[in-house]
Amino acid sequence: MMKAPVEFWFEFASTYSYPAAMRVEAMAASSGVELHYEPFLLGPIFVSQGWQDSPFNLYPAKGRYMWRDLDRICGDLGLPFKKPSVFPRSGLAAARVALVGAKEAWGPAFVRAVYGANFADDRDVSRPEVIAEILTDLSLDGAVILERSNARANKDLLRSQTEEATRREVFGSPSFVVQGELFWGNDRLEQAFASARRSGLP
Amino acid sequence: MMKAPVEFWFEFASTYSYPAAMRVEAMAASSGVELHYEPFLLGPIFVSQGWQDSPFNLYPAKGRYMWRDLDRICGDLGLPFKKPSVFPRSGLAAARVALVGAKEAWGPAFVRAVYGANFADDRDVSRPEVIAEILTDLSLDGAVILERSNARANKDLLRSQTEEATRREVFGSPSFVVQGELFWGNDRLEQAFASARRSGLP
């Protein structure tokens, strides 16, 4: 039997998506599971819940805990981490590029590079110029790819991604979907892949 | 060096506190770590964040996910689980009794029995009569203990517990505190005890 793929739903502004994004490709490879990168925007979903800002800003004790927890998680994984000087940073420009990259070989490396730029290097990934620099650092043509990412069809595709996330009842990032079953959070990455591996058993 | 104790801050209405409460005593014993049971009420903390109900009721997609996630967690742990017909159920009466029990040998068994009654047997643990039955099932004098739990000094103590939780920046249940460091959620139980074990190293 074929194993079910894992859908990785991610918003670039999301903090806990950083360690997940850095681990997900290796986990897919070692699991022998197909991985689908599914960028989306969490902002519209938060707004529909009445939040105009990240809950980590709206609820300060929860926010202070999150930064401490993320620091510990990155420490345990040996991932560099530096609290960004601005939070959240819009993931719009990066998500549009990630959608272009979802069909190309450089896609996964781009996703990791954006998360690292934001959460390890404190670079302003909300700015298209920074996204272009990240693409250039990957030996890609930043200007051309940015232009492709801003094509009407691609903008519409990102909008439909966010609608698709809502249909899957995604309410946070990172989320993993395996055969319609939702797993939320970096803490559930292992469980999601275990579910996909089991799906391949006769 | 003495190992630092683990403070276990819990609210009886909390869903994820059920698997944590069922595991915490065995984890403390195998870690050689002192465990402090710290019942408190999450309601006043939620109200201070503008929530008049559980966030799992206020945000339906998050709520539906939580029940599915809890079902999977209990399945993995071999814990019986049945979604309560009413959620949340007030933990006030049980928390007052747990405070009495915190200084007595029956305390931990009572805590587990209340969580099991709510989340495995769908009993209405908000009712003092049910709490008395649970005490009786533990071969205790339910009427006498309930009366002690309703003494003015014990009610004040529960109020000060909730203030103390706020001072520790506790914003959810279960929470673990080790040397002032906060660990939130059933998912962080292992990490909290690892921190306590490390504290005993020279």
Image (spheres, coloured by chain):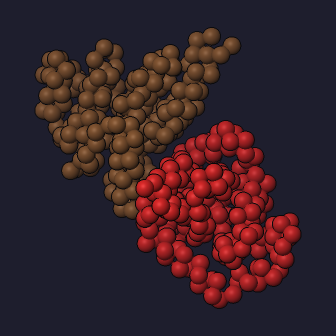
Chain colours: A red, B brown
Left or right: residue B161 versus residue A77 is left
Left or right: residue B9 versus residue A15 is left
Q: Residue at x 65, y 64 (%)?
A: A12
Is B179 in front, or is B162?
A: B179
Q: Position of residue B199 (x, y in %)?
A: 62, 20
Is B91 in front, or is B191?
A: B191
Residue A182 visible here: no
Residue A77 visible here: yes
Residue A128: image quadrant is bottom right
Numbered disc total: 0
Q: Residue at x 14, y 22 (%)?
A: B136
Q: Position of residue A163 (x, y in %)?
A: 49, 76
Is A157 in front, or is B165?
A: A157
The N terminus of chain B lies in quadrant? top right
Is A202 in front, or is B185?
A: A202
Q: Is residue A148 above or below residue A122?
A: below
Q: Residue furthest top?
A: B1
